[in-house]
Amino acid sequence: MAGLNEQDELAMSTDELLQAQVELYHHCFAFVKSLALKDATDLRIPNAIHRRGGAATLSDLAAETGIHPTKLSSLRRLMRVLTTSGVFSVVDDAASAVYKLTRVSRLLVGAGGHANLSPVVGAFISPSFVAALFSMREGFTDERAAAMSLYEVVHGRTIWETTAAGRSGEIFNAAMAADSRFTMDNLVREECSGSIFGAVKGSLVDVGGIHGAAASAIARAFPHIKCTVLDLPHVVAGAPAHDNVIFVAGDMFDYIPPAEVVLLKNDEDCVKILRRCKEAIPARDAGGKVIIIDTVVGWSQGIVYKETEGLLDAFMMCVDGIEREELEWRKIFLEAGFTDYKITATMGIRPTIELYP
């Protein structure tokens, strides 16, 4: 076997070896792109460009964000990373470079009526999650860590215990609310949503709905639906008032309020929750169903989608979560007592699953 490997190595040309080195280094430094995105978001650079009418020079950005003039060279290097990666675009004129928003960075200011996704960046690219991923070798090999998530290995408590109170909880809840609002705003715009949510005749309960972003989007698009949000007491206590949305404090593992449809976006202990959902809904011929918005690995097309699925699945190891293939979902559905399901693809990485009793 070693001889074959040596032959393959000898068969590689100098150009191929150097190209392989570039690809290796690209993987090594990929984390810099994520951190550069977080730095730009923390500095509110997308907002600065937006305030300047969608185009700004380095001097404009420094003036808008409070960056010291002596750091313009460093800012230029940061923007080079973010323009080559497509977060911003750049136009070089005779005087100086002018930076503009792209479709990615527009999401960080909520331009065009879209939800502002900057809270998601701050929550995902956080020191606590990065530290957890750095402990992957220990989490895989240390017997003491066998029953723990990577997050627990490093921090000594679960992510849910961390976010139960304090600033970490506020950041996490803000991120989940922004993600839910963005997802639901786009979903209800799609024609397929007419058959998914438009077919609901009475009530819907959003399980683990945090501050009601998803339920509010549904209520706005389909005013005839009576929407309820179920979440833990400390989460519901911080929820803003929403028209046509009722908040119920409780534990999804213990009880889910009766409703025609249950909306689920959290798959922790999935079988147990789905059984509770099944108890809460009527029979299929009475409109009963559970709607799940989550990743189905393999349904997305294109290298960026597939790589994002893989990265998200690896990230979920921090909290002992998982992204599932359709066969894995099907097994869970059957174990929870459901008889049928339907998957509707979207342009994003999370299709809609309709689950029937």
Image: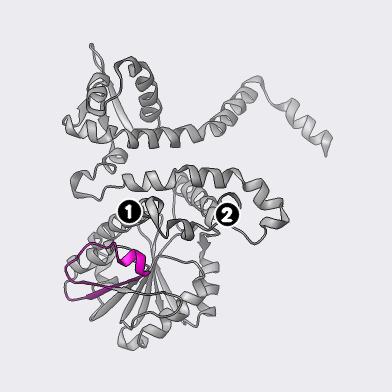
The residue type indicated by label 2 comes to Gly
Q: Is residue 125 left or right of residue 216?
A: right
Name the quarter where the C terminus is drawn: bottom left
Mark 2 highlights which residue?
A: 156
The x and y percentages for residue 157 are 54, 57
- What is the x, y in percent for residue 226? 22, 77
Q: Earlier in the sequence, mark 2 or mark 1?
A: 2
Q: Which portion, as a residue range, is magenta?
A: 224-247
Say whether residue 239 is magenta: yes
What is the number of the mark on residue 174?
1
Please say whether residue 357 is visible from this viewpoint: no
Determine the residue positioned at 29% across, 76% down. Answer: 204
Q: Residues within 10 Å of mark 1 (few under 14, many from 20)?
A: many
Residue 235 position (above or below residue 137): below
Question: Which residue is rendered at x = 69% and y = 26% of the image?
Answer: 12
Can residue 75 be seen here? The reply is yes
**Closer to us: mark 2 or mark 1?**
2
How far is mark 2 from mark 1, CA to CA? 24 Å
Q: Quadrant of the N terminus?
A: top right
Q: Extreme top residue here?
A: 94
86 or 135, which lies in front? 135
Q: Is residue 323 magenta?
A: no
Give the quadrant of residue 9.
Answer: top right
Q: Position of residue 240 (x, y in %)?
A: 23, 62
Q: Nearer the viewer, residue 198 or 36?
A: 36
